[in-house]
Amino acid sequence: MFARAALFLLVLAGAPAHAQLPPAVAARLAAAGIPDDAVGVMVQRLEDGAVVLAHGAERSLAPGSTMKVITSWIALDRLGPAYRGRAELRTSARIADGVVHGDVVLRGMGDVDLDWRAFERMLQVLRHRGVREIRGDLVLDRSFFRPARTDIGVPPFDEGPEFRYNVIPDALLVNTNLLQLDLVSDGKRMQPAIATPIDRVSVESAMTLVDRACEDWEDGWKIPAVVASKTGELRIVLLGDFPRNCTASTSINVIDRVTYSERLFRALWKRLGGMHRGRVRDGEVLEEGVLLAEHWSRPLGDVVRDVNKRSDNPITRTLFLTLGALSMTDPALPTAQRAESEIRSWFERNAIPQEGLVIENGSGLSRTERIRPSQLAAVLRASGRAQWSPEFVASLPIAGVDGSMRKRLSYPPALGRARVKTGTLRDTSGVAGYVAGSGGSTYIVAAIVNHPMATRAVARPILDELLDWVAHLP
């Protein structure tokens, strides 16, 4: 208490910032075997930028998902909260007597909400226009991002390449390429079912039943096998083990992207009473043609809540690439490079140093991305005073209330008063956001731990101790 009170007096008097970590934080680090130099912290008062604590704030560290603060804010600042991605169905072919005599193009422009239900509604509009048959191909145009596919040949990021968080997006990511599975077991067997409408795809279980808590069902999960028959059927075989008397659901990405879109389209078009005689293939169509149907994503002001509260990687990476696709930089450059240029230009306009900043995909799901806590704090200060600040702040998880902070700091004074983006990777844990101090001031907090001992269980209490300390500031 004496150390905390002493620091209050120093801050109030405008004294220089402390470089030493708060004693309680330092004690937790020591107990965990994590050295002080594995930590970077910046705490600033939002109102005037006064630095309260700067410990290793200039270290370039792996940020984990705290990197989403950068992408989500710059997307809001650059595009505005009303921006919406979209998808279109178009054709340049003749339409007569309910038949499209040629190709139909499904073009994606970063629509993050193009799930199978939205795709079905687009096809329903096509039926309402009187179209009952497509005699050409369904062409999947992903050219809004260049290259159109960056997922091909990329090694898995970790041991869970089939799960949503690892899906590498493109401009036309129909239903995020996911199969939704419902998993139900009794005392004798586990029965899986596919909830996503899809043509000639089935699922079966080869999982062993075990005695384990249902909430820990993923502990026995293994990457499913995909078996193709000579007749074109695909069987998804679930492997590993599963608890008895358990009900769970998950979504997996295990089918080739074009194959998935084809089988989803055929299932939906068939149940709408449509016929199709062509193929489903990737392609870029330069001629605009006639707009047959379209779908718009939610406004960006809503989408950034998924980015930060749910820490959604595919959506974040789509926003990152959208920044590049709409950039005024050289259109011949890859979209990701143009997106990086947009972010660096924003840093330059806001007089934020870029040394130590490494950008790969804007989501933090990366082994190469790096940022300094001082840079994170500078972005948070700029966003906290800007036009779209309310939309951005509302996207951040609230301590003890929702998102990744729902079960953290569920006690005063931080409860409900800290809005913080979290980040976790192997060897990495971080927080970045705003904390309302007990005396009425709002503080910016950016803190990252990079160390082999910085597991979720070890690092989170350390960072929570820091956030609690800030919540007690005047």
Image: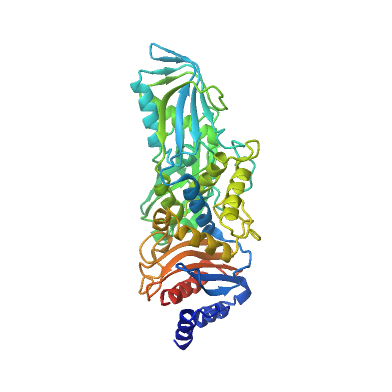
At horizontal 53% and vertical 55% (from top left) the residue drawn is: 70
Q: From the viewer's perspective, is residue 315 above or below residue 131?
A: below
Q: Is residue 336 left or right of residue 290?
A: right
Name, please, the residue furthest toward the top: 97
Res. 5 visible in picture: yes
Q: From the viewer's perspective, is residue 395 above or below residue 446?
A: above
Nearest the viewer among 337 and 97 is 337
At horizontal 36% and vertical 26% (from top left) the residue drawn is: 125
Name, please, the residue furthest toward the left: 128
Residue 173, how many percent across, how many down? 50, 38
| Colour pattern of the rendering | rainbow
Q: Quadrant of residue 295?
A: top left
Nearest the viewer among 361 and 53 is 53
Q: Is residue 426 left or right of residue 250?
A: right
Nearest the viewer among 176 and 382 is 382
| Figure quadrant of the N terminus | bottom left
Residue 346, how many percent across, how many down? 56, 52
User: How many discs appear?
Assistant: 0
Res. 240 visible in picture: no
Residue 261, how many percent across, how many down? 49, 32
Q: From the viewer's perspective, is residue 80 above or below residue 259?
A: below
Q: Quadrant of residue 59?
A: bottom right
Residue 443, how many percent across, how many down? 45, 69
| Figure quadrant of the C terminus | bottom left
